[in-house]
Image (cartoon, rainbow, N blue to C red):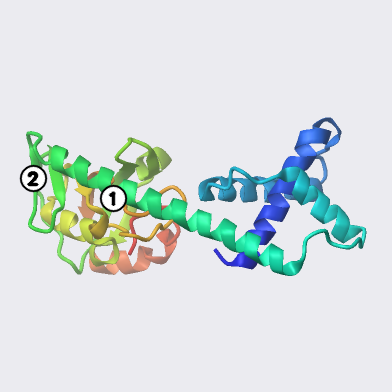
Amino acid sequence: MKQHRLAAAVALVTLVLAGCDSQTSSVELKTPAQKASYGIGLNMGKSLAQEGMDDLDSKAVALGIEDAVGKKEQKIKDDDLVAAFADLQKRAEERMTKMNAEAESAGKKFLEENGKKEGVVTTASGLQYQIVKKAEGAQPKPTDVVTVHYEGKLIDGKVFDSSIERGAPIDLPVSGVIPGWVEGLQLMHVGEKVKLFIPADLAYGAQSPSPTIPANSVLVFDLELIAIKDPAKAAADAGAQADEAEEAPAK
């Protein structure tokens, strides 16, 4: 996070917190501007919560905004402010490093234990899968587009995306998804349902694609291969489903 973005986030969300602390009863959320203002504070608050910013002083932020709006002399010199933001940024990075290491350790332990379970197969890449419903249909090739139903979870069981929940299967190019899916889909037959247990290095690795999927996460998918699409029909439908999956396992 860039320093100026962090500063803006801190200012906005803590201003909202300060208002809620002392004037909750007088705050109205009726007009579009008021609702948008609340939404900005809500989104910023969620972002800061994910960054672990739990020791910010909302009253101090409110004082800073009051001084700026009132064109008063600032109470802290710029050099001291730069140092303070640098410290805040450092603590956020340290927390993220710790979280990433913990996720990596938890994922490794999960896969070690899961691989010992009956019916779980571990491939040479480290991908684990378990056949839930066996079928004898065709198997997709890397160049195919397939129709699937899926639900993605973290190892703690938290669902981060589900076409099943949305009630609409999606079309995906076999080679256009994360490596764990590329391999897993080609192991499946049309009509089959499997569980995929995907190591972080076959998913998103040290990158976090969204707040719902932390870095170094092992991903668990319930996956059903419904069909292999006809190439001509797949091309015609490609645009229609471009935004179908909010957290689909794209590259």
Q: Tag 1, which secondary structure?
A: helix
User: Is 85 situated above or below 212?
Assistant: below
Estimate how packed mark 1 is, as few (under 14), some (14 to 19) or many (20 or more) residues with alpha carbons within 10 Å: many
Q: CA distance from mark 2 to mark 1?
A: 21 Å
Residue 246 in view in this figure: no
- Residue 1 horizontal side relative to residue 138, left or right: right
Which residue is more in the foreground, 244 or 36? 36
At label 2, counting other C-alpha atoms closer than 10 Å, the crowd grade (few under 14, some 14-19, many 20 or more) is some
Quadrant (top left, top right, bottom left, bottom right) of the C terminus:
bottom left
x and y, in percent, of residue 247 in the image: 41, 53
Does residue 212 appear left or right of residue 169 in this picture?
right
Please state the horizontal and vertical placement of residue 164, each as a whole percent of the image.
35, 40
Residue at image coords 52%, 59%: 90
Element under label 2?
A: strand
In the image, farthest residue toward the top:
25
Name the foreground residue: 179 vs 45: 45
Query: What residue type is disc 2 on?
Result: Val
The disc, 2 or 1, on the residue closer to the chain's N-terminal end is 1
Within the image, what quadrant is residue 156 found in?
top left
Q: Nearer the viewer, residue 71 or 169?
A: 71
Q: Amino acid at mark 1?
A: Glu
Q: Quick check: 233 above or below 19?
A: below
Q: Which residue was labeled with disc 1?
A: 104
Disc number at residue 130?
none
Residue at left 33%, top 56%?
A: 249
Left or right: 142 as drawn, with respect to 21? left
Q: Which mark is residue 121?
A: 2
Q: Are marks 2 and 1 in contact (CB under 8 Å)?
A: no
